[in-house]
Image (cartoon, grey):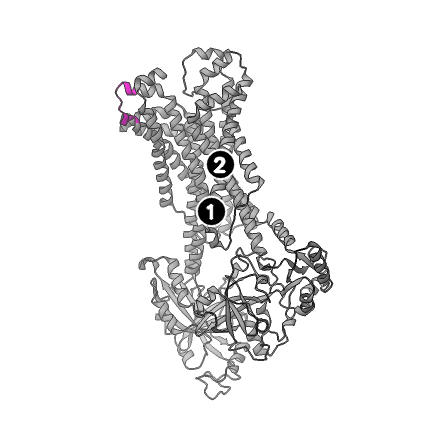
Amino acid sequence: MFSITLKLMKKSARMLIPAGIAILIGTAFIAATFLFGNAMNDALAAQNTAQLGGANYVISPDSGKDLTDKDQDYIYTRTVNDFQLDRIRATEGVKDARASYAGSVTVTRGNKHASSYVITTAAKRTLLPVTITQGDQPADSNEIALTKSVADQLGVKVGDRVTVNSQAAQYAGKTGDSAGNTGAAGDESAQNADGTSSHDGDSDAASGASVSSDGANTADSGMTVRVVGLTDDPNGAYAYYGGASVLSDNVITAMAGSNDFGNLPVYLVYLDIDDASDTAAASTVKQVSTLLPKHFSVQSRAALVEESVKSMSSGETSITTIFLLSFGILAMLVAALVIANTFQVLVAQRRRTLALLRTIGANKSQLYVSVLFEAGVLGLIASALGVGLGIGLMAALCQSGLMKATGMTMRLVLSGPVFTVPMAFGIIMTVIASLGSARSATAVTPLEALRPIELTDTRRAGVVRAVISVLLIVAGVALCAFSVWQMSENIAGRDSMADKQYPLVLLAAIIGCALIFLGLVLSATFWLPVLMRGVGAMVALAGPSAKVAHANIQKNPRRVAATGAALLIGVTLVSTIATGAASAKQTMNEALTTRYSVDMIAAGTDMTGKQASEAAKVKGVQRGIYAPTRMMTMKDADGKSLSVLVVGVDGVDALRKVVRSDLSGVTIDGDSVLMPKYSAATGKDIPLDKSVTFTAGAAEAQADAANGPSDNDANGSAENGNGQSGGTQTLTLKPRKVDYRRIASNYAAVAFVDASHFTNGGIKADGHIMLMRIDAEGAGVALNDVFTNVQNVFSASAGVTVTGPVAERTQWETMINGMMALLVGLIAVAVLIALVGVANTLSLSVIERTRESATLRAIGMTRGQLRRSLAVEALLLSLVSGVVGVVLGTLFGWLGSYMVFSLYGDTVFPFEWATNGVVLGVAALAALLASVAPARRAVKTPPVEALAEA
């Protein structure tokens, strides 16, 4: 029987090809998913151990033992001296040892500044976690090997001199604390590109104080060092920081706020041990272990790699794999619908053959097994090809280097699940999809061998399916209605489950949508043929080709429903995502507009007027004002202290150019101050007395005194422009409240005063702010370009930050667009398989209707008319299913947006014309292309020959 089945498969090979393609695509996706997970694990493991450099052993804390808080404190307060590096280096078999310590510094040359992550040097460059691409690693005092990106940014090369400084250095210079911070630095681990902490343990040099080893104060001018090399980070050891520079011991000591390298806190030491002989290496490790503080041990690099992979196997890489696998399973479910269609027609076509087999002795179980065996063979062959395709695609991705943009270098890593899971899933899904057809095969009686073949499926869908579908839809609608009701109650301020159990309400909405969708897919055999019949009746009026197409679609409603449902799944998901993304962007844009009164704000202590002038010229910046600022404190009418950014402006007319708020009837003069109605910190009304007093805090007053007399206080006396004493600046004004919001979110309020208070010495500016109104659309530029160009203008000033709703809107849209592109790309696999199903349906219909097509040709239908009838049939299948999918997806997207984004503002319910139009256009085009091959087959056979074969 099996040999007969194989011969039947060979005869029907052309019919099996579309189903095989559907299986191939699904299994290739699943195989590629496992390969991607393997590649991520491998890349992250390599990245997590990249900070070891060429070290083959590491001195690290004993993580496997139960340690008390006292033990933990002991571990993280160890210094370089505690590890006796000189004795370790002198141990036989130890080639080199490097204490792991790192931090952040500012590198300056001329008027250019750049931030760089810095690490300790080593005697041999092989022990460094970064590569020296030019020059050499620091060996003597006052040397640095800069990252190539920082060197390019500053315009320096090997041999030039730069200045390095840090917050710790400045702090130490002001306080005179040069004893270092031997314990406070703690575990400031370097991070990977994905933000996760790795096995670095490099303590943060910025957390101590700073005096150079030769006693020179680095607080203001920093240390001048010579660039001896340039570094690269090919393995992504410090990808999160854009690489790392290497400092000589005395410089990193100064940047850490210490005067002795031995006092720097460390808890990791990297070793290069001669491991040519396992016995000699073990002896060396044993000798080194005797020199270590308690709770520390020597661990091999191989053991660290094994631990890293083990920790990630249940972490984010497995989550990513599961997420991608869900789309692979979706693709296989859609493929199952295509497979089911194929086998239904195969069994129908073979009814006479199956009847003859029954006549010569084959029993029902043999026919049943025969169909399942055929499905298994098809699944095996297509799945094997799919695995091969998946491996090929992943290999091409790894070789292309596209993933280097994420900071990871990926390679092809094969494993058992790459082969077993896709093939098992492909075979099982194919066999399951053929079960219905196998049951149909057992219903064939020997007498049917003598009857004419009638392939039209007249079976009616079962009552059980109808009942289940209705129950699912009713339950889904009820859950969605309940979720919407609870959210509306919460938004209205009434008692609601969404207030305390929001995740459960959101989950109810998700489950409701899933039940509705599942019910509609199960019941598609009832409503989709009826819908196509109605649309087809109107299309039939267009001419004979359309009339024939309409009649053909009605012949097999079950297959039409299965094909339409396959396409419905993909289009609905794409439309849901597109609608949700559009709603998210528009809703958040509205929310940001109401929460901010200024489009873009640049603020900082080192902003210059020249930079402000350049920013005002950026295309898309409609208007801007540049003003001095001072951080002061005040008390409201309830006696609560508020931090306030006081901004000096030239009258209220200047504000109207940039502030989106009703400023009518408001003035700003020497006796008044413009205050916001609501606090940026709490969102509540700020109660004010008839007058408010702003005061520069003690720390600010001390800093002013340390800086000496200002231009407005040439004698350096204790009196300022307002007559206050002791260097403390105060300003008492009459408040006028207006509802403007979040000018600068770091302060409870931003107050606008007349600029004369800054020019006459009443207030001493400690920074500047630039308020900008943006009109990107009117300027014909992208919002992201405006934001980026303004950032570039202020890039030379390390203390200037650019914020505001434009910045948040840009980041939000970038994130949403990226997620949407990813999800749509994944779902496109299911849409592709569904379109293969459309082609399959047309091909099977042509095979079924060989006699009918020949008869139509014989009575005068031209080849062009026959082609057009198949094209119309394909368009009806794809567009009707596509339109229903768009409607469902839009409704689901609106519901999801309401459930999520109504928490942030008034939800916008858009219809995504562009994306939905593209989806329907692609479906229509693919349907037309899918009709080409079947049409050629239908018209190339002469009518007489076709009638004879039929």
Amino acid type of the residue tagged 2 in the rendering: Gly
Does the CB distance between marks 2 and 1 fall below 8 Å? no
Identify the mark nearer the N-term, 2 or 1: 2
On screen, 495 above or below 150?
above
Provide residue 572's location: percent of width, then percent of height: 43, 39
Q: Residue at x 38, y 25 (%)?
A: 845
Most common SS among magenta residues:
helix
On screen, 826 above or below 772?
above
Q: Is residue 862 magenta?
A: yes
Q: Residue at x 28, y 18 (%)?
A: 858
On screen, 142 above or below 290?
below
In the rendered image, the quadrant that contains the C terminus is top left
Instruction: Determine whether, in the image, residue 464 is placed left or right of residue 614.
Output: right
Query: Residue lying farthest bottom?
Result: 715
Displayed quadrant of residue 192: bottom right
- The foreground one among 184 and 12 is 12
Q: Is residue 290 magenta?
A: no
What residue sits right under mark 2 in the picture?
386
What residue sits right under mark 1 in the picture?
397
Displayed quadrant of residue 702: bottom right
Q: CA distance from mark 2 to mark 1?
A: 16 Å
Instruction: Determine whether, in the image, residue 546 is placed left or right of residue 582.
Output: left
Provide residue 327's location: percent of width, then percent of height: 49, 40
